[in-house]
Amino acid sequence: MRKEDIHKASNLGIARRRFIKGVGTAGGAAILAGCGGQEAGDDEEGDGGNRHEAGSGIEAGEEELAQIQELAWITNQDLPVLPLMEKLAQSFQTTDDWEVPGSDSTDLMYYWPTEWLPRFGQWGATGDDDTLTLTQWAVPEDSQYNPWNGVEYAEPRRMLFDRFMAYNIVDAEYEGYAISDWEIDGESITLTVRDGLTWHDGEDVVAQDVVNQLKLDMYSGGTLRDFVDDASSSVEAVDEQTVELTLSEPVNSEIVLGLLQPTRLVAKDSEYGEYVERLDDADGDDEEVEIYGELTDWAVDEPIGCGPFQYEEADSQRTLLTKFEDHPDADNIDFEQVENRHMPSNDARWSALQNDEIDGDATLFMPQNQVNQLPDHVQIAEIPRHWGMGLIFNYEDEHFGQREVRQAIAHVIQRDLVAENSGAGTGSKLGVKYPSGITGDFTNRVEDEWLDGVVDEFEPYDHDEGRAEELLEEAGYAKENDVWVDGNGDPIEIPIKVPSGFSDWVSAVETVVDQLRQFGFESEMLTRDVGTYFGQDFPDGDFVAGVEGWANYDQAYPYYHFDHLYTGGEGSIQAAANFPDEFEVAPLHDEVRDGDAIDPTEIIDELARTGTEESDE
């Protein structure tokens, strides 16, 4: 299951400190999420085995590493979120009528293989089938393709629109695509539009289209807006193929490229240029909000794309795309159509793969008992996601607002068992060893690299009910008749909301609730419809405890995870869980900060600008 598609916000700049007040992110679905996972393979030695290591080429200087460790320390000590597990994703490809790279090939290590391999000429037909059949969550005829609307923003976008760049997650290399070349020189970034890239109505893709895309992403609260003085004047078309982006000061290129790469080129000037011009000329925040609101209300049901396939038709069951012969990569593709069938549940997709009704799925959680029923010609590739489910605490709750309670719960929950039950026999989930907001447990990068030299300072929150009892008693709680109660004799209630459609998350929360009950908490699982949970409950802060992704999926560099967690704004995790502006945590590195009170976003902003000289060489 692709939870990031349920959110309809995988392409958007998630709400931030500078987000347009009163609008929220597109469709009200602001938090990034994801799903998937498959057999991680045997790794009894815990050294990563034969797994691919994402981002192994990423290195951090001494100052950078200290800042990363400081952010991890704040997270580890205060526990605004309890990271429970990290995961690998599984990606499915059928091989009876299709030729694809082997499941262990690094050629599959792109997000997502279903959209990149056909473009590269690496997903080819070997039989008479001229249609690649995939899936989609939204009802096809109700789908729309304005990413700033976000509602029912459906999977066919992956073939309809080209991303700025490709990124191999194992090699940690950016590859030119819609943006064929780039140059970062201090505060200036020059982007070059790919030769021969054409919109499906026959017009050339030009620099102004890229300018529109960047501006609208910034106006919607995209991260780049934090690094420019003024969204309206910081990006311009120099000529038909060249875009100049001016930053307020140098920014680490690892971060800049990571922000640019996944951008999907949608903002054709004849379609979106009017909104850009009006936002540029807006007189104050109120007018900006009004204009942006009009953009988010606009539903595009017949998109003009620039990808290798163009929109043909949609009904209640499928969306049909046909090959666009004028795309620069058209000659690489030897099939004529892509269809996305409406399959809004995990079990429907399991059945479709088992019965040869679809040709693949980008990423989908399938428990081992279902994997065992797949035909031999269905291969499964394991893709590092640098992501996983975490328990989010609402700081406005009378109990969870206390650090001792959050820490006690961390000592009660057995994360390895939660991961094992959630993985359902696939080995795709690992319990987080050091709750710190840093990913890389599958290859031991957390303790061997990111926390190198300081890991012994970090609290692993091992299963220790004795320590949990001490913490609760320090906070004024007592155990009466096997139930933990507060000073008024009222029991500590821990209802945990979870989206009902995410089977692996439901299994995880069931395990958590069972462990909390056995310890003496009054806990229960509250399942909610997916749309209700992510559209209302979570973004509105209507939960005591909830579940969400504790990291910015698909990114290995820790900056993104802390930015995802702490950088606030309408619809963000920080806003939903009512995190304080400052956390009281003694410093790990005195050279990074003075005093106990700290706003993590200050360190995040410093991290973005650290090492710029080294990264730009």
Image (tube, rainbow, N blue to C red):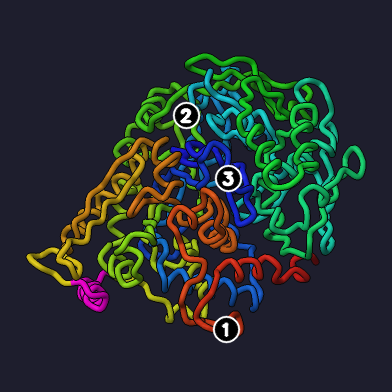
Sequence-first disc among 3 and 2: 3
What is the quadrant of the C terminus in the image? bottom right
Can you tell which mark lies on residue 281?
none
How far separated are the C-alphas under marks 3 and 1? 35 Å
N-terminal label among 1 and 2: 2
Q: Nearer the viewer, residue 532 or 93?
A: 532
Amino acid type indicated by mark 1? Asp
Mark 2: amino acid: Trp
Q: Is residue 380 visible?
A: no
Residue 130 vertical position relative to residue 286 in the rendered view, above or below: above
Circle 1: element type: loop
| Residue in the picture at 60% in, 45% down | 110
Image quadrant for the N terminus?
top left
Q: Earlier in the sequence, mark 3 or mark 1?
A: 3
Which residue is labeled 1 in the image? 594
Answer left or right for 129 relative to 583.
Answer: right
Against 371, residue 228 (above or below) is below
Q: Nearer the viewer, mark 3 or mark 2?
A: 3
Circle 2 residue: 137
Q: Where residue 267 sits: x, y (%)?
A: 73, 34
Q: Position of residue 411 (x, y in %)?
A: 28, 69
Neighbour tally class for label 3: few under 14, some 14-19, many 20 plus, Cα within 10 Å? few
Q: CA distance from mark 1 to mark 2?
A: 49 Å
In the foreground, 199 or 349: 199
Q: Residue at x 54, y 36 (%)?
A: 27
At numbered mark 3, what does the secondary structure look like: helix, strand or loop?
A: loop
CB atoms at circles 3 and 1 under 8 Å apart? no
Range shown magenta: 463-477
Which labelled disc corresponds to residue 22?
A: 3
Q: Is residue 171 magenta?
A: no
Horizontal and vertical percent position of residue 487: 19, 70
Mark nearer the viewer, 3 or 1: 3
